[in-house]
Image: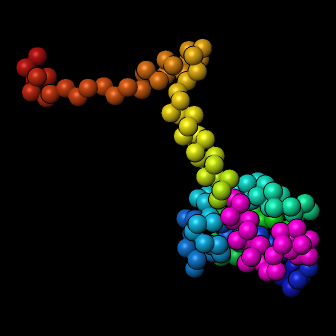
Amino acid sequence: MSGDSSRIRIWTGYFDSRLSRSEGRRVSVVNSIPKPDLDSIALAARSLGIRKMKRETNHSHPKRPRAKEGYLVMSTKDAHSAAGTNSKEELMAAIGSRLATTHQEAKEKAEEERKRGPKKGDRSARSQRKAKRPQPKRNKRRQNRR
């Protein structure tokens, strides 16, 4: 499939913010997230309007032979018409932008939930919250006297 121009492969490593451009990241840091998974990239592509895609799991990119990351395969014509792009780079930037906004929204929602604390009737969460309080440090001199 290396010479097939009717299909596009989109690897998860293209959107990994932990990788440098020379290591295989192909979108800007703003449009990338740490440790992207195949499902989140597929959801981002689906939210752009790309309906027909195939997920190939447990495949490794030639630049990262030990990482079994997987990739998406989609029709070039369908992907460009659905996303309104002209090239693979524009398509990846659009998917990356959607992926980054989704990731940021989930992060903000989790932070808001954490700040809100456990619900009123959730005894187990409330008790765990109390147990996580840091213990005061004791003075070593005082311990030696006892």
Does the magenta portion include 80? yes
Q: Please indicate whether residue 140 sits to the left or right of residue 35 in the image.
A: left
Q: Which residues are magenta?
A: 76-99
Which residue sits at x=78%, y=54%?
A: 43
Q: Is residue 48 above or below residue 114?
A: below
Q: How many marks?
A: 0
Q: Nearer the viewer, residue 90 or 5?
A: 90
Q: Quadrant of the N terminus?
A: bottom right
Q: Is residue 127 above or below residue 93?
A: above
Say which quarter of the image contains residue 143: top left
Q: Would you say the magenta stretch is mainly helix, strand or loop?
A: helix
Q: Is residue 44 visible?
A: yes
Q: Nearer the viewer, residue 35 or 80?
A: 80
Does the magenta portion include 25? no
Q: Is residue 18 above or below residue 107?
A: below
Which residue sits at x=76%, y=58%?
A: 44
Q: Quadrant of the C terminus?
A: top left
Which residue sits at x=73%, y=78%?
A: 89
Instruction: From the top left corner, tell me how far across and down residue 92 is, in percent.
Output: 73, 71
Q: Is residue 69 visible?
A: no
